[in-house]
Every structure is written in structure tokens, then in C-alpha cells.
Image (cartoon, rainbow, N blue to C red):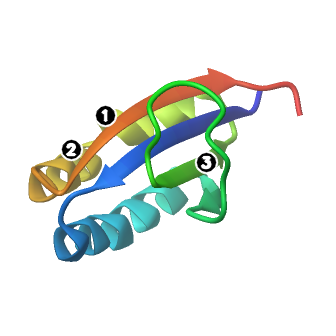
Amino acid sequence: MTAYWIGNITVLNKEKYAQYSRIAGEIITEHGGVCLVLGGTYKQLEGIERSRNVVAQFPSLESARKCYYSEKYQRALKLAKGAYERDVVIVEGFI
């Protein structure tokens, strides 16, 4: 079943975040993911407003989980330390 990795992000350091974002995009692709939303116009309806929203589609919840916990992605997270505040969730979908 398809899964979606959803991130709501407040960027604190644009240069560090841009570096992380390039690396993370490559890793997501390596795990079968496709970025569907990278920023864009939005309207906050509830919860914490974050200026950047990201949605990546994966073949399964397991492939999204493996991507997040992969050695490469964990290294990318360390490089990006202090570059953002964010909330991330992986959810199964039916589409």
C-alpha cells in the first residue's frame, strides 16, 4: 500500500537546509520515493504554521521507514542539525 512522508518545516538556516534538501531528495529517490510537494503556496487551517511543506510518496510504509532510518538519511539529518524545526509523519494511503 502506498505511503506518504509528510513534513512541515520552519527553515532556520537556508544554506544548511538547501544542502540537506538536495541530499535528502536523492536518498528519497533511492528508496523508491517521489516528491509530490516541495514548498508551494499554502493556507494554514490548524496547528503550528510552518513555512515549508513537503510530501513524498513511497511504494509502502516500510520503504518510507527504511528511507528515514537509512544510514545515508541519518547522516543527512546530522548535517542539517540546527537548519530547521519540523514535524514529520509517515502515513499509509489508499491511492
Badge 3 or badge 1: first in the primary sequence: 3
Q: Residue at x 55, y 38 (%)?
A: 6
Q: Along the line of sight, which residue is nearer the eye, 15 or 78?
A: 15
Is residue 22 left or right of 1 when viewed as pictured?
left
Badge 3 or badge 2: first in the primary sequence: 3
Q: Residues within 10 Å of mark 1 (few under 14, many from 20)?
A: few
Q: Residue at x 60, y 26 (%)?
A: 46
To which residue does mark 3 refer? 55
Vertical position of residue 24 compared to residue 19: above or below: above
Secondary structure under tag 2 reads helix
Q: Along the line of sight, which residue is nearer the eye, 49 or 64?
A: 49
Mark closer to the observer (3, 1): 3
Q: Amino acid at mark 3?
A: Val
Quarter of the image with the N terminus is: top right
To which residue does mark 2 refer? 74
Q: Are marks 3 and 2 in contact (CB under 8 Å)?
A: no
Where is residue 39? Give x, y as percent: 56, 63
